[in-house]
Image (spheres, helix red, strand yellow):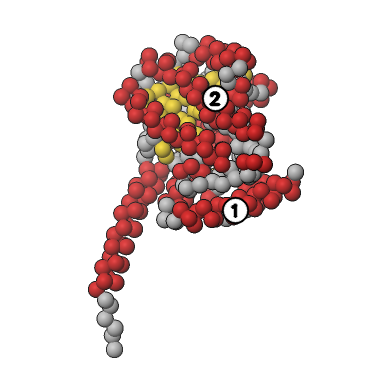
């Protein structure tokens, strides 16, 4: 004998299907964009030069190489002169038509006499250049998974100076030229720790600095959109770089979702000028973002604390 299905059950199932369908539409649209939308000509749209902070390793170096491949000359800013020169030589050897300038700047020294001198050098380096793109990539993530009371306070303060104050001052130094020319793009590298999850315990100060970056980007985009300047916080999740610590690598649940720096940089360049003030350029990481949104905050909090306590235990063994 057939069992009649209650009307209330059918109604709830239909509502659930409609909700899931509506939630999936933005995801499918973003995934389609990644594959079908042609990237804009950054050089023609914004300008012939870009400023990149932290371009000597990992995502910063991959981004510098990607922009150079698109015909954009580069002002490279980092704290190590030898590494800057090495990357500069590599770029000019690989892309013979590209010009480079280097500025030695330890962003943790902003607000000091040394930092003020480096800031003047940056302003002099970009003066008269058609700087169309700024990529604020430099960031400090260490110390790793620790309770705040266990960390060296000076190291936490250094993290804030680099990730917050340094980024803000570099942006303020480059913006006037963009305003004068009436065009430009500012790309601030954020973190999935502030977009995809409600908390990121034991990496608290790091994720808090990236929350500042996301909010700053939203506000600047509103302020400057009408003046021809696009501002984005591009949000990577896990990427295979030096910032991916051994503790994180040892506990990755879905390693297939970890992008290479080169692949992420290609996707990130495609998203400049598109996707709004907050965007996740990598398609697989957009899927992660979508799935994370289906999980209750309390479950996120429990899982993240559990995982990060494992990170803490691994770090304590290694040190």
Name the residue: 37% across, 36% down: 276
Query: Residue 287 location in percent, x, y?
Result: 44, 51
What label does residue 266 carry, if any? none
- For the residues labelled 2 and 1, the Cα–Cα distance comes to 30 Å
Name the residue: 59% across, 55% down: 306
Q: Quadrant of the C terminus?
A: top right
* Residue in the foreground of this view, choosing between 219 and 276: 219
**Relative to residue 261, is residue 178 drawn left or right?**
left
Q: Does dot 1 land on a helix, a strand or a loop?
A: helix
Query: Residue 242 location in percent, x, y?
Result: 64, 38
* Residue in the foreground of this view, choosing between 70 and 103: 103
Between discs 2 and 1, the one toward the N terminus: 2
Q: Is residue 204 visible?
A: yes
Q: Is residue 125 visible?
A: no
**Dots 2, 1 in contact, CB < 8 A:** no
* Residue in the foreground of this view, choosing between 69 and 100: 100
Query: Residue 176 location in percent, x, y?
Result: 42, 16
Name the residue: 34% across, 58% down: 20
As drawn, 25 above or below 216: below
Name the residue: 51% across, 21% down: 170
Q: Quadrant of the N terminus?
A: bottom left
Q: Does dot 2 land on a helix, a strand or a loop?
A: helix
Circle 2 crowding by C-alpha within 10 Å: few under 14, some 14–19, many from 20 = many
Query: Residue 122 location in percent, x, y?
Result: 54, 15
Q: Which residue extends farthest front?
A: 149
Quadrant of residue 139 in the image?
A: top right
Return the residue at label 2. Answer: 166
Quadrant of residue 159 in the image?
A: top right
Circle 1 crowding by C-alpha within 10 Å: few under 14, some 14–19, many from 20 = some
Return the residue at label 1. Answer: 307
**Relative to residue 141, is residue 235 drawn left or right?**
left
**Relative to residue 205, is residue 235 drawn left or right?**
left
């Amino acid at each position: 004998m057939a069992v009649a299905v209650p009307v209330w059950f059918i109604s709830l199932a239909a509502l659930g299907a409609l909700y899931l369908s509506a939630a999936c539409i933005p995801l499918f649209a973003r995934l389609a964009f990644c594959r079908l939308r042609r990237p804009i000509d950054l050089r023609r749209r914004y300008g012939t030069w870009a400023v990149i902070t932290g371009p000597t390793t990992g995502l910063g170096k991959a981004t510098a190489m990607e922009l150079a491949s698109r015909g954009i000359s580069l002002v490279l800013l980092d704290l190590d002169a030898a590494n800057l020169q090495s990357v500069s030589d590599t770029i000019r050897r690989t892309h013979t038509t590209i010009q480079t300038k280097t500025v030695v700047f330890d962003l943790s020294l902003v607000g000091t006499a040394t930092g003020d001198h480096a800031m003047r050098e940056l302003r002099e380096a970009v003066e008269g250049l058609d700087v169309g793109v700024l990529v604020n990539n430099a960031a400090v993530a260490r110390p790793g998974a620790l309770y705040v009371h266990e960390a060296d306070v000076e190291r936490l303060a250094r993290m804030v100076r680099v990730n917050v104050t340094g980024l803000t001052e570099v942006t303020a130094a480059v913006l006037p030229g963009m305003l004068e020319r009436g065009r430009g793009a500012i790309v601030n590298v954020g973190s999935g720790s502030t977009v995809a999850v409600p908390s990121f315990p034991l990496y608290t100060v790091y994720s808090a600095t990236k929350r500042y970056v996301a909010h700053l980007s939203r506000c600047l985009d509103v302020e400057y959109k009408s003046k021809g300047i696009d501002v984005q916080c591009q949000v990577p999740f896990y990427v295979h770089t030096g910032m991916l610590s051994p503790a994180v690598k040892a506990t990755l649940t879905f390693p297939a979702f970890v992008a290479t720096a080169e692949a992420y940089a290609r996707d990130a360049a495609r998203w400049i000028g598109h996707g709004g003030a907050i965007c996740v350029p990598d398609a697989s990481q957009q899927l992660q973002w979508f799935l994370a949104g289906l999980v209750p905050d309390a479950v996120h909090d429990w899982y993240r604390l559990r995982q990060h306590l494992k990170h803490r235990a691994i770090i304590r063994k290694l040190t």
